[in-house]
Amino acid sequence: MKPWETYFREVEPYVAGEQPKLTSMIKLNTNENPYPPAPDVIDAIREMNMERLKLYPDPACEQLITAIADTYEVSAEQVFVGVGSDDVLGMAFLTFFNSPKPVLFPDITYSFYDVWAKLFQIPYRQPALDENYHIQKEDYYEENGGVVLANPNAPTSIYEDLHFIRDIIEHNQDVVVIVDEAYIDFGGTSAIELVKEYKNLLVVQTYSKSRSLAGMRIGYAIGDPGLIQAMQNVKYSYNSYTMNQTSIAAGVASMKAKQYFEECRNKIMDTREWTKKELANLGFSFPDSMTNFLFVTHESVPAKDLFEALRKENIFVRYFNKPRLDNHLRITIGTKEEMIKLIAFLYSYLKGNCSEHTRGFA
Ligand SMILES: *Cc1c(COP(=O)(O)O)cnc(C)c1O
């Protein structure tokens, strides 16, 4: 070891899903939206004054914050924006979790939470989901340094209603409670409506899934002005210009394209319901997803075999080689055409493996 290496920060990084460079593939592995961004977003980027790129962007992101505040009927002082919700969540961990008591989040959830906790040296504990992959709310009643919940949860796709979320906040009035709503636009009810009641609640959302802008990197948090101001102070102590001019323009246009947003998310939810029926006919089971993905397991064929067989067909899904997850696949809802191809392949593959289970596939 070189002497200077003794003082390197040692971290085990988060592993993102694969981004294969193939031109022809069915990509159902990272929960991106299969539809392009709203036409208004593309126009807004085209119409940008490129000469202005010589100037720094607005560090306060006023236009973007106003567009988000208008959409959710909150004040601009209640909105924080960042480079994807990963940036927003990381900033929130850094800002709010400085207690010696452990921060709580489930053992099975978005796998970035424990990475940030380790990076920032935040003590944490991960109460186990129950045998049906549900959060047990009583686990969050004990003393802690903060609570983080993804709702719907990932990769389980399970949504808990607002009574459940409210109960956890009620039991945690002296710490910050973060609700990560990356998938809330696919059928759930947002906890944003609880923000006016609970000054310790921070709701985080993203443009990456329901708004087809994963490549632009825009996320935001909505909470009490006290929480938002504290996050701004940390942001301005690290990097004032996180949001570039293009992201700001795209983010504003996307929030205003309400009809396109509704059409897109409804198409995905319809395709999800169709896919559920087809997968059930093929012998798969899964929780009732309120997201743009399904968390599936097959009654007789191991998930790893299915993952590898799909991969050979250039159909990419997500496989987690982890306890309690290693017989499941997380399959993103793509376009109807993509899901038809997925089902057709699974039908022919499973027919060879377990013909008695492929009942009723037309
Ligand atoms: C995708 C995802 C994120 C991160 O999204 P970005 O905004 O693209 O950084 C955060 N939390 C969960 C649960 C996610 O699934």
Image (cartoon, rainbow, N blue to C red):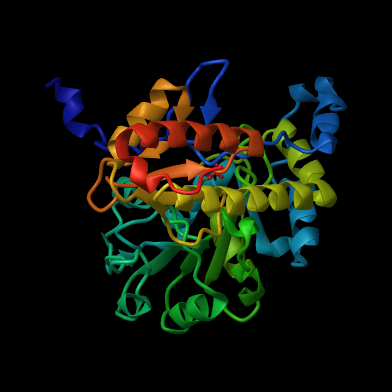
Vertical side of 202 occupied by 58: above or below:
above
**How many dots with numbers?**
0
**Residue 26 x, y percent position in the rendering:** 54, 28
> How far from the left and from the top, in percent, is residue 219?
61, 47
Left or right of 119? Residue 169 is: right
Which residue is rendered at x = 65% and y = 77% of the image? 196
Residue at 25% across, 45% down: 322
Q: Quadrant of residue 69?
A: bottom right
Identity of the residue drawn at 39% across and 68% down: 146
Q: Where's the N terminus, which quadrant?
A: top left
Q: Along the line of sight, which residue is nearer the eye, 204 or 165?
A: 165
* Residue 187 rendering spot, x and y as whole percentages: 63, 62
Nearer-the-camera pick, 160 or 343: 343
Q: Nearer the viewer, residue 50 or 274?
A: 274
Quadrant of the rendering where the C terminus is positioned: top right
Examine the rendering and report whether any part of residue 25 can be seen: yes
Q: Viewed as shown, does residue 326 lie left or right of 275? A: left
Q: Residue at x 15, y 20 (%)?
A: 2
Q: Is residue 183 toward the left or the right of residue 171 in the image?
A: right
What percent of the width, then of the height, locates residue 239? 55, 39
Whether residue 110 is visible here, answered yes or no, is no
Corner quadrant of residue 339: top right
